[in-house]
Amino acid sequence: MSSGARVRIAVIGLGFGASFAELYRLHPDVAEVGLCDANPKQLDRFDSARFRRHSDFAEVLSGKQYDAVHICLPVTQHTEPVLQALRAGKHVACAVPMAHTLEDLERIIAEQERTGLNYMMMETIVYGREYFYAKHLKAENTLGQIQFLRGCHSQDLEPYNPLWRGLPPMWYMTHAVAPLLDILDTQAVSTSCVGSGVMREELATQYGNPYPIETAIFTLKNTPVKAEVTRTLFETAPYGGEAFDVFGEHGTFSTIGLHEPRLTTIAPLTRTGEARKITAQDLPSIPFRPDLLPEPLRPHASGGHGGSHPHLANEFVRSIVERRQPYIHARRAANWCAPGICAHASAMRGGEKVSIPNF
């Protein structure tokens, strides 16, 4: 597409993808929105006068009808559609994770760089209101020196698509690790991970994964700070959803297991041996940052994974219009997915330390 032209985009998969359709339609830099799903009932939910509808992904990729696609297919079915779309000359946004093997991460990076097209992994938590606020606290030095990071993502995915059943927890952990790596602008270089609990045999069969829960410690590049991530997927009462904690010398910002985010601060040390005042403040009114969005999307700023959906859609569209790589480009996406792949490998080796490649 020419510089400054409006984008024509198709959303692939109208389960999770349905929440992005109207956001793209309202975006001032989008000229046309197509929707694609093999299930006609999914397509029938949308007005054909507002959206062009397709039942065949190949039809979307053929010709020059669209400039970009946003892929929201089941969790283990991302790699090949992404590669097909790039080869067809389309910019690509894709739900997490980028891939489940290091080799597939490399394949996507290679194809993106060969084509020069945009690839964006649509990681929600780093565009959610809690993470926006954590970055604000860091920028204002409210937290002081960051000392430790913790991420958690807790779900029960057994009732959903059969492809989920028995999935290794760390294969789907970007929501827990992305804010930790991003807030320090770093990468994970090694991990030791352990599996915990007992999973029913019918769940363990599909992926050969015996663990309903996995917990990893990550060593990070160019910092003494360590990060801990726990992921639960099955056979466990879920708590906390997608959450993270940032522990600082002056303040700690917490979201794990809490109804509202909390900022805990400690007063400066005035005299050795003297108790320091500790104050905990719940933060129910953290802003959703509509000011960062184009006017038509601002009424939707509170919707979808902590308000992340309109910000994700806007970043993908603007990166194409401005002819630049998106923030969560292919190499950054790989550096947020590789830790989980390597962590599960560590768990399957009894917690053995595993090096994580740098993409």
Image (tube, rainbow, N blue to C red):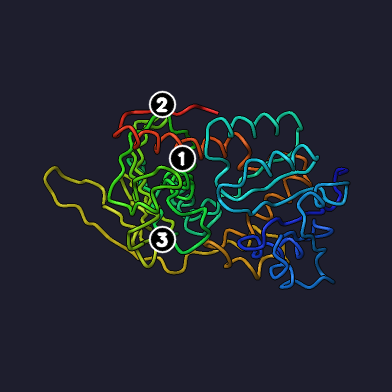
- The image shows residue 303 at horizontal and vertical percentages of 58, 67
| In front: label 1 or label 2 | 2
Q: Earlier in the sequence, mark 1 or mark 2?
A: 1
- The image shows residue 202 at horizontal and vertical percentages of 39, 53
Q: Which of the two residues, 334 or 286, is positioned nearer the viewer here?
A: 334
Q: Earlier in the sequence, mark 1 or mark 3?
A: 3
Image marks 2 and 3: residues in contact by CB distance under 8 Å = no
Q: Is residue 133 above or below residue 206?
A: below
Answer with left or right where residue 15 lies relative to residue 212.
right
Q: Which residue is mark 2?
A: 355
Q: Which residue is mark 1?
A: 181
Which amino acid, by three-letter code, is at mark 3?
Asp
Q: Which residue is mark 3?
A: 156
Q: Which of the two residues, 345 or 147, is positioned nearer the viewer here?
A: 345
* Cα distance in 3D space between marks 2 and 3: 29 Å
Task: Name which quarter of the figure residue 170 lies in.
Answer: top left
Q: Which of the two residues, 77 or 120, is positioned nearer the viewer here?
A: 77
Disc number at residue 280? none
Which amino acid, by three-letter code, is at mark 1?
Leu
Which residue is most to the left?
A: 273
Answer with left or right where residue 232 lies relative to residue 130.
left
Label 3 packing within 10 angstroms: few (<14), some (14-19), many (20+): some
Write the residue at 82% across / 69% down.
50
